[in-house]
Amino acid sequence: SSRGDRIFTASNSSRGDRIFTASNSSRGDRIFTARLSHREIANPQGDRQGIIICKGFLLIDSMKPGPSTPETLPTFPVLGLPVHLADNYSQWLSSRLSQGLGTNVITLNAEMAIAAESNQPLAQLIRSADLVIPDGAGVVLYLKFKGHPIRRCPGIELAETLLNHVNQLRPSGLVFFYGGKPGIAQKAADNFQRHIKGLAIASYHGYLSDSEEQEMLASLRELQPQLILVGLGVPRQEFWIAKHRHLCPDAVWIGVGGSFDIWAGEKQRAPAWFCEHHLEWLYRLYQEPWRWRRMLALPHFAWKALIKS
C-alpha cells in the first residue's frame, strides 16, 4: 500500500487452489500471477525481478508491461438486453485474443432476443457476456432507429476474421471446433487449413455420447486452445459455453450456430445482395423452409420494438 500496488487473492473452492495477482496501479502493469495449493510464495529479489516458484506452484504468467487492455465498450439495450457498440468488433476482439483475455461472445439476433424474454437463464447469460454483437438485421435496424447507426456484425464473419489472423495474434496457438454432424467440423477445419498455412485446429462433432463428451472436455482442458468455436445451435451452444468456459479461462469463445455447415461446403451462405439488404433470413428460409416457425420471431421482435419505442 505504501507504493500504490494492489494485491488480489481469489480461491478456487473446487480444487482448494489460491490465485494471487499483483499489479502496480500507478503503471497499470501486472507483476505476476500464480496459482498454488496451500503453499507460500517468496519474492526476495523484488517485485520487478520475478518470483520463486516452490514445488507445487503453477506459474500462469510473469510479465512486464505489455499492450494496454482493450477499452470497455459502451452498450445500448435492445428489448432489455445489452448490445455493445463498436466501429470495429473484430479489432477489439483480436486485441483481447492476442493478450489472452478470456472473452465470451454472444451473437444477438431477433430470434435470440425474443427467446430470452421467456427464458430468464438465457437473458442473464446474455447480460453477463463480455461481448454482445449485433448479428441480426432486426437488432441493427432497432439500434439505427434509436440513434445508433451501426454496421451488422455477423458471427460467422467475426469468426472467419479471427481464424485468418489467429496465427499472427497468438503464434503457435490452437483453434477448437465443436458441433455439427459427424464429419462436418473436421471438413470445415480441413478447408481452413488448406488456405491458412500453419493453422492448428482440433475438432469434435456435436453428437458425442456422454463418455465421449467427457473425453472431449478432458482434451479441451489439456490443450488450452486460444479460440473455441461452438456450433450447437441457439440456445444450447450459449449454455454449453457458460457451463464449460472455466476449462479454458483465457480463450475467446463464440457460438457460431450452423457456420460449420457453410465452412464445410454443405450449405451456402446468402449472396451478398441479401446480406447487404438485411434479407439473409429470407434466403435461409428458402434453403430451410422448416424454419418458418422460428422465423415468426421476426415480426414478434418488430412489434415488441415498436411498443417499447
Image: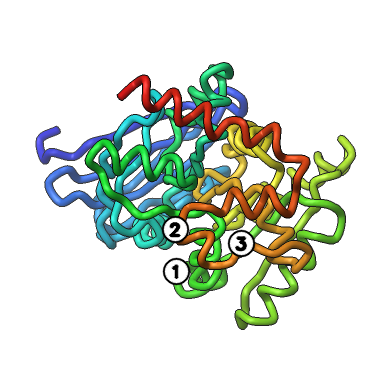
How many marks the image carries: the answer is: 3
Callout 2 crowding tier (Cα within 10 Å): few <14, some 14–19, many ≥20: many
Q: Position of residue 90 (x, y in %)?
A: 40, 60
Q: Amino acid at mark 2?
A: Leu
When asked about the image quadrant of residue 198, the answer is bottom right
Q: Nearer the viewer, residue 7 or 253?
A: 253
Judging by the rendered image, the residue that carries numbered circle 3 is 270
Q: Secondary structure at mark 1?
A: helix
Colouring scheme applied when the structure was drawn: rainbow
Q: Secondary structure at mark 2?
A: helix
Q: Is residue 152 left or right of residue 235?
A: left
Judging by the rendered image, the residue that carries numbered circle 1 is 169
User: Are the residues tagged 1 and 2 within 8 Å (C-beta)?
Assistant: yes
Q: Nearer the viewer, residue 273 or 70?
A: 273
Judging by the rendered image, the residue that carries numbered circle 2 is 97
The answer for how far apart the CA atoms under marks 1 and 2 are is: 7 Å
